[in-house]
Amino acid sequence: MIGPPGVRAAPNESRITGTVVAVDKSSVGTRWTVRIDTAEGTDKLPNFAHRHIGGTVQIDVPPNFGKSIDRNDRIAATICYEGDEGGGALFLVNLDARKL
């Protein structure tokens, strides 16, 4: 038997800057591995990325987006975490990502 669904993460959003260390295919399109340099909250929403400054995260990117982003590029992006206490993923918000 599968238990009840977990508690969903609160709405959140972070504006990050960082360096792309890997670009890989994923089940949802592309997955960027990014070393985060800065992370700021937006619109009074919690900033879940701040604890990853100096570390790396994986960001799921929709198909056919960000094809000009490659390994070693510095980027700015708006991301959010979607999931629950059992797991989840980081996603781009409104396709907001660009090279710096």
Image (tube, rainbow, N blue to C red):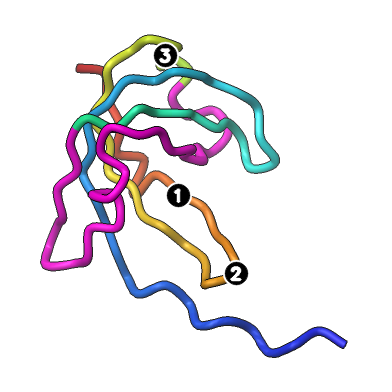
What residue is pinned by disc 1? 90
x, y (%) of residue 49? 29, 49
Classify residue 44 as left or right of residue 85.
left
Q: Is residue 59 above or below residue 2?
A: above
* Spot occupied by residue 63 in the image (x, y as percentages of width and height): 58, 33
Point out the image quarter for the C terminus: top left
Question: Residue flagged by tag 3: what amino acid is it?
Answer: Ser
Q: Which comes before the other along the chain, label 1 or label 3? A: 3
Q: CA distance from mark 3 to mark 2?
A: 33 Å
Image marks 1 and 2: residues in contact by CB distance under 8 Å? no
Which residue is pictured at 14% across the width and 48% down the height?
A: 40
Residue 2 occupies quadrant? bottom right
Q: Which mark is residue 68?
A: 3
Q: Is residue 58 left or right of residue 79?
A: right
Q: Is residue 60 magenta?
A: yes
Q: Indicate the quadrant where residue 16 lies.
A: top left
Q: Position of residue 43 (x, y in %)?
A: 12, 63
Q: Is label 1 in contact with label 3 (beta carbons under 8 Å)?
A: no
Give the mark count.
Answer: 3
Q: Amino acid at mark 2?
A: Gly
Which residue carries the number 2 mark? 86
Q: CA distance from mark 1 to mark 3?
A: 20 Å
Does the CB distance between marks 3 and 2 fall below 8 Å?
A: no
* Residue at the (40%, 33%) spot, across then down: 56
| Three-letter amino acid code at the position of disc 1 | Leu
Residue extent of the magenta highlight: 38-66
**Which secondary structure lies at badge 3?**
loop
Q: Is residue 70 magenta?
A: no
Tell me the distance, in whole angstroms, between the alpha carbons under discs 1 and 2: 14 Å
Quadrant holding the N terminus: bottom right
Looking at the image, is 100 positioned above or below residue 15?
above
